[in-house]
């Protein structure tokens, strides 16, 4: 199988669907490829974020807001653990769930992966990674789709009237990705105990919002793009005035979830044409932490993130795209596999479960489910 993948040739044998549906393989079809499938998380985040409640008095009263300098004397963590996840939708599928007159249900076949890079001492190394494939669908009886190139585990979600199905499926995928990120982060923490990082001396930096990961100790969410204005205009002006290394005071932001957060300017190439928010990142930590601990984490973020800021010539999103995260993301994407092969494998499986040659007359739906087949067996003892 591996050889076939390497040669780019989809070769039989492939396994048909696991067929938990009375031995009958689940019938489905594959849509034409559209690269926009499942990439609307930014819109979801934006919608969720657009009604923020903000308390700016966590660290300093609003009237005393000022840029806060880094404290160079602050001890840095023995290890920084950078956590990231990637997702990719390989196909949109339509699942026939067998109900007479029933419509086909939409599903997304996606691969996703999470990993953790440890930066300890002078080196960065990959500690843990996990790759998964899933079929995300609202079809209540969907089974896994098994192809020669990989198995898509079924994740069924209930449809609701409040949200369009593509958004439900995308959120379901995002939720699973978050779960895998948490699992890999916890495992990575346990693993680095083996190479001399004292307990409690590490810091988790999760690429993206901390939502769903707030319970992890010593964890920061790292946000590179700014679509929502959280601060009132008189305080928001401070962000653009930050010097490299400086941060705003901590504030509390509540949307559909709560967190402590602050803005920080990373070190960057100086120049006359630098945009006001260039190098600005927003850091999050749990809303449940006492303010003293939060302010400690904010100070820590100032002294330990800057040295990972990427140089402009290396990364289009520099300097916000920290280079351990950029490297991790590349590695995770590579491990997702070739999307064209996976899509071809999905099409082959779809054809196999639909083709008359495979669903021979003896195993077609009417023969299996018709009362005539089962009735004699049931009534025989009488
Ligand atoms: Zn390490």
Image: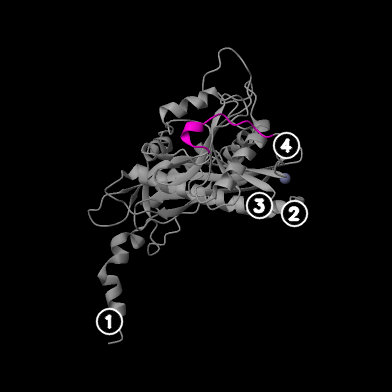
Give the spatial CA distance, label 1 vs label 4: 84 Å
Q: Earlier in the sequence, mark 4 or mark 2?
A: 4
Q: Are marks 3 and 2 in contact (CB under 8 Å)?
A: no
Q: Is residue 206 above or below residue 24?
A: above
State the residue position of label 4.
73
Coloration of the structure image: one colour
Q: Is residue 183 above or below residue 220?
A: below
Q: Are marks 4 and 2 in contact (CB under 8 Å)?
A: no
Q: Are marks 1 and 3 in contact (CB under 8 Å)?
A: no
Neighbour tally class for label 1: few under 14, some 14-19, many 20 plus, Cα within 10 Å: few
Expressed as whole percent of the image width and height from the top left, the position of residue 137 reads 38, 50
Neighbour tally class for label 2: few under 14, some 14-19, many 20 plus, Cα within 10 Å: few
Considering the whole magenta stretch, tell me its main secondary structure.
Answer: loop
Residue at point 62% right, 25% down? 244
State the residue position of label 3.
189
Which label is found at residue 194? 2
Give the spatial CA distance, label 1 vs label 3: 60 Å
């Amino acid at each position: 199988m591996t050889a076939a993948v390497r040669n780019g040739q989809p070769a039989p044998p492939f396994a048909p669907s696991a067929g938990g549906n009375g031995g009958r393989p689940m019938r489905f079809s594959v849509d034409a490829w559209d690269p926009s499938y499942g990439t609307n998380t930014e819109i979801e985040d934006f919608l969720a974020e657009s009604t923020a409640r903000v308390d700016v008095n966590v660290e300093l009263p609003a009237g005393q807001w000022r840029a806060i300098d880094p404290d160079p004397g602050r001890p840095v963590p023995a290890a920084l653990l950078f956590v990231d996840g990637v997702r990719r939708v390989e196909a949109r599928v339509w699942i026939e769930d067998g109900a007479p007159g029933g419509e086909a249900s939409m599903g997304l076949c996606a691969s996703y992966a999470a990993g953790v890079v440890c930066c300890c001492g002078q080196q960065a190394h990959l500690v843990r990674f996990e790759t998964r494939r899933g079929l995300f669908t609202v079809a209540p009886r969907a089974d896994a789709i098994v192809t020669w190139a990989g198995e898509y585990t079924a994740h069924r979600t209930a449809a609701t009237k409040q949200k369009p199905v593509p958004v439900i499926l995308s959120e379901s995928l995002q939720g699973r990705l978050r779960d895998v990120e948490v699992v890999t982060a916890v495992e990575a923490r346990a693993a680095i105990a083996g190479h001399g990082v004292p307990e409690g001396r590490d810091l988790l930096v999760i690429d993206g919002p901390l939502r769903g990961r707030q319970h992890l100790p010593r964890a920061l969410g790292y946000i590179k793009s700014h679509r929502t204005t959280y601060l009132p205009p008189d305080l928001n002006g401070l962000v653009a005035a930050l010097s490299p290394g400086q941060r705003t005071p901590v504030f509390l932001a509540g949307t559909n979830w709560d967190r402590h957060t602050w803005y920080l300017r990373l070190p960057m190439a100086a120049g006359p044409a630098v945009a006001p928010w260039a190098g600005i990142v927003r850091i999050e930590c749990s809303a449940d932490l006492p303010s003293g601990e939060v302010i400690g984490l904010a100070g820590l973020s100032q002294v330990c993130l800057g040295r990972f800021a990427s140089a402009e010539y290396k990364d289009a999103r520099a300097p916000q795209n920290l280079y351990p995260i950029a490297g991790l993301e590349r590695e995770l994407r590579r491990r997702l596999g070739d999307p064209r092969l996976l899509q071809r494998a999905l099409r082959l499986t779809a054809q196999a479960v639909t083709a008359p040659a495979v669903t021979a007359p003896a195993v077609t739906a009417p023969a299996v489910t018709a009362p005539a087949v089962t009735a004699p067996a049931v009534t025989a003892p009488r």
